[in-house]
Amino acid sequence: MATASLTVQNPNTCVTANGGGSWVNTPFTSQSGIFTVSFDATPSASKQNSVVALSSGAGTAYTAFANLVNFETSGVVDARNGGAYASQTSVPYTGGLTYHLRLVVNVPAHTYSIFVTPPGGAELTIGTNFAFRTEQNTVTHINNYGAFVNATTGTIKVCNFLLQ
């Protein structure tokens, strides 16, 4: 029987990024191979530009993050693929509802796949083997997640961050 390692990071803690504020960074055990993270994200409003992202070290700008999931101003969830945001599946979101996200990250290949489960729905694919953000395509490890709201109001709340 195969076994998997599961590490709950801050098991009873949620982090919240506020509009008009800065990036909220949370470190986790450094990963340099293939790994999976999952978490629940709740944007406070629809069509609000909110991001949850992974990086090597704490980041203070979008360019510091290798893997970015975006609750887009157009009202859909997308992710960074190299130099632009994209989505294989159009997944609309509604402010105040919680979405479960799962990222499978391949640090040596500098790729990641992104999956989202809407409330009461089935898991959908946002992207498969998306490239790390262009500015981060040579990182050798990932050890931080950050949350940010690119607006003057609103929040993004991230809970149940799991590292596998």
Image (cartoon, grey):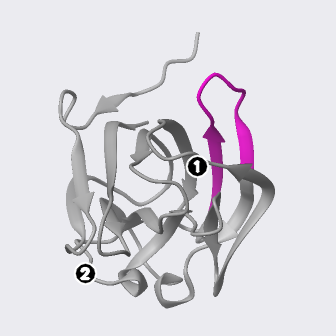
Vertical arrangement, residue 129 with respect to residue 2, above or below: below
Looking at the rendered structure, the secondary structure element under dot 1 is strand
Q: Position of residue 71 (x, y in %)?
A: 54, 60
Q: Which of label 2 and label 1 is nearer to you?
A: 2
Graded by Cα atoms within 10 Å as few (under 14), some (14 to 19) or many (20 or more), the crowding at tag 1 reads some
The residue depicted at 20 percent of the width and 73 percent of the height is 21
Residue furthest top as drawn: 1
Q: Which residues are magenta?
A: 112-125
Q: Residues within 10 Å of mark 2 (few under 14, many from 20)?
A: some
Q: Residue at x 53, y 55 (%)?
A: 46
Badge 1 is on which residue?
104
Q: Is residue 92 above or below residue 160?
A: below
Residue located 22% across and 72% down the image = 58
- Name the residue: 24% across, 38% down: 9
Q: From the image, tell me which residue sits under label 2.
A: 60
Residue 4 to residue 21: above or below: above
Where is residue 64 shown, x and y percent of the image?
36, 82
**In front here: 104 or 141?**
104
- Say which mark, if any, is on residue 83: none
Q: Amino acid at mark 2?
A: Thr
Q: Position of residue 141 (x, y in %)?
A: 38, 67
- State the residue in front, 121 or 30: 121
Placement of the C terminus among the 4 image quadrants: top left
| Amino acid type, label 1 | Val
| Side of 121 relative to 64 (left or right) | right
